[in-house]
Amino acid sequence: MQQTVIQGNRDPQDEPTLFEKVRARILSGEFEPGSLVPEAGLADDFGVSRTPIREVLKQLERQGLVEIQPRVGTFVHKPTRREIAELFQLKEVLEGLAAGLLARRGPVPELEILQRNCEESELAVEQNNSKRYAELVHEFHWTLVRGADNKKLYEQYEWMMHQLVYHQLVLKTVTKPSRLLASNSEHHQVLEAIREKDAMAAEFAMRSHVYTSSQLAMVPEEVKQTTSEPFYLH
């Protein structure tokens, strides 16, 4: 599931900056947590010297995506269980709020996007197409937040979604059919509450959805490996 990173308010037609390109490579899961980030390789890939790459890596360190060890190298940040838990707590609050705000707005273009998204998600589930479903999950959540029409909420959400933890958790999972079906059903429940303009129900449904995902995400690695089918985070 490469390149599922959404670039927030950027015009899709704009050429990504070097910073955005390198960040996307980090968030894509191309480099394992704790692994060395190849400065020279990135410089060659993007046709630049190592100097601008180093400047980009300094910015990424400030965002918590990498750790620079002087005279050793730059390493991909390895998230702790606490970071994972805190991320999902924040995600639950922000997405729940977004769902409630969207429900209060009434008929807006985002509702049709969410409806189409749910329909395409059903098809992806039927075809057991986990890659496509994952793409649609990202679209669903981002559309929900955009539809809330709250700039401050959006800024906080954009910052959160550029954190390494969430993307690595998603990218390292494979679909478990029962969870995939449940996830899709939960999305439908959220959309139904929004269409009914029931802000409280929409917020509750979204928070419940994220909470369920967080509980699965916190299952210890050794437990996951003993199951016949890996779980899916959404």
Image: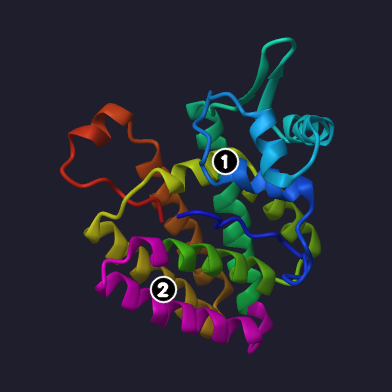
Please give the name of the residue rendered at 57% of the width and 36% of the height, measured from the top-left corner: 86
Q: Quadrant of the N terminus?
A: bottom left
Please give the name of the residue rendered at 47% of the width and 54% of the height, measured from the top-left corner: 210
Q: Where in the figure is residue 140, as x and y percent of width and height?
A: 52, 69
**So how many labels did they put on this image?**
2
2 vs 1, front mark: 1
Q: Quick one: label 2, few (<14), some, or many (20+) residues within 10 Å?
A: some
Q: Is residue 108 left or right of residue 224?
A: right
Q: Which residues are magenta?
A: 104-133
The residue beneath circle 1 is 87
**Amino acid type of disc 2?**
Gln
**Amino acid type of disc 1?**
Leu
The residue beneath circle 2 is 189
- Indicate the secondary structure of the residue bearing disc 2: helix
Q: Is residue 130 above or below residue 11?
A: above
Q: Where in the figure is residue 211, as x and y percent of width and height?
A: 44, 50
Q: Is residue 122 above or below residue 82?
A: below
